Image: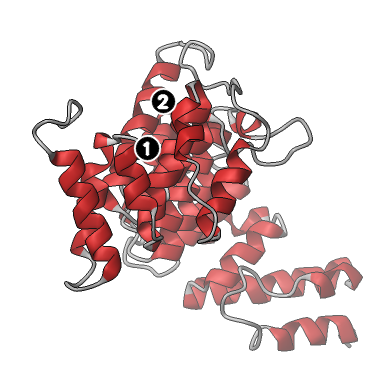
Amino acid sequence: MTTQALQTFLRSLDHGAVRQDTYDLEHLTALTPAERTMAEDALLHRARRDHDRRAILSLADLGVARAIPVLEAIAADSASPGAVWANLALDRLGADTTERIAHDALSATSFIERFAAVHALRNHPRPVAFNALVASLDDPTPALRSEAYAALLDAFGLTPLVRTADGQPEFNAPLERIHLLVASPLESLARRGADEAGRFVRGLIDGKTPQQLDLIYQPTAPADFGDALAAALLDPATPVPVERVRAATGHDRAWAETFLVAQLAVSRPRVPAAIADLGLTWALDALREARRAIGEGDAYANELDTAIARLAAPDNPGTP
């Protein structure tokens, strides 16, 4: 006679939200060892028969070592819908599947598979993982690029450099500025961010320190600098503080420029004029990309056209 807990668990295998990574494993805490084996057998059956993602990941979460041969067989079948998940499960069970996960991060067909593989690589500070994460910064999906960048910071132990002393995000930090670029929907900015990330990764691999690579935030602006700029962009009645940005230096100036240019992805009025006022010729590609996405006759399109003309003028000393 099986207990109610086991019966509930076995019934739950036919239910549950598809987006859940695993089945509901809470019921297993009340099982006897023999019942626990029966529950594991049910998961193994589903993994073996259906290559079921939730069964595969449930086996990993439960630490079922006897599942390893089944998972290896699934992982070896490149056409299997469970291959990516089997590699991740094997990794959690202690097998060395880093190279396979790195391959999945770049070649898996679905976004969720690539995202899961990228996320797992943060726990593997090895060249094969670094290379895959840098390459993932070219993924077409901003959310995955953002995850790959965060995974890179974790893998190199750099995450504390984007946090304040009390654990809050340090938005003006150099590494957060690069993250802002990487995660941008604008291809020109994402490419710029990926290039910067690639440079500091190469530097770290070559033995340089974060200090030598200028990755440690050194504030030079007043504490309200970032908030004042963000608030001005949200309130049409508040002038964009161009002169405060112009007067800023170092990391704060670099962040402010990037923050302004990143707003082109959301068509925020007055931003193109501020970019032109500051002479940010490096933003021309982003301005042109934003302009291509907008039809003729739009008021914001006129703002973009004017800014582009100003920055691209032959007498502009910064024109590329």
User: Where is mark 1, residue-wise?
Assistant: 134
At a point 50% along the width and 54% down the height, the residue shown is 233
Q: Quadrant of the C terminus?
A: top left
At a point 21% along the width and 45% down the height, the residue shown is 285
Q: Nearer the viewer, residue 242 or 292?
A: 242
Say whether residue 288 is left or right of residue 57: left
Can residue 12 be seen in this snapshot? yes
Q: Is residue 284 placed above or below 56 in the rendered structure?
A: above
- Numbered badge on residue 201: 2
Q: Is residue 44 placed above or below 280 in the rendered structure?
A: below
Position in image of residue 248 (x %, y %): 50, 26
Position in image of residue 109 (x %, y %): 32, 64
Can residue 104 be seen in this snapshot? no
Hey, which quadrant is residue 293 in on the image?
A: bottom left
Say whether residue 100 is left or right of residue 312: right
Say whether residue 37 is left or right of residue 204: right
Q: Nearer the viewer, residue 195 or 314?
A: 314
Q: Residues within 10 Å of mark 2 (few under 14, many from 20)?
A: many
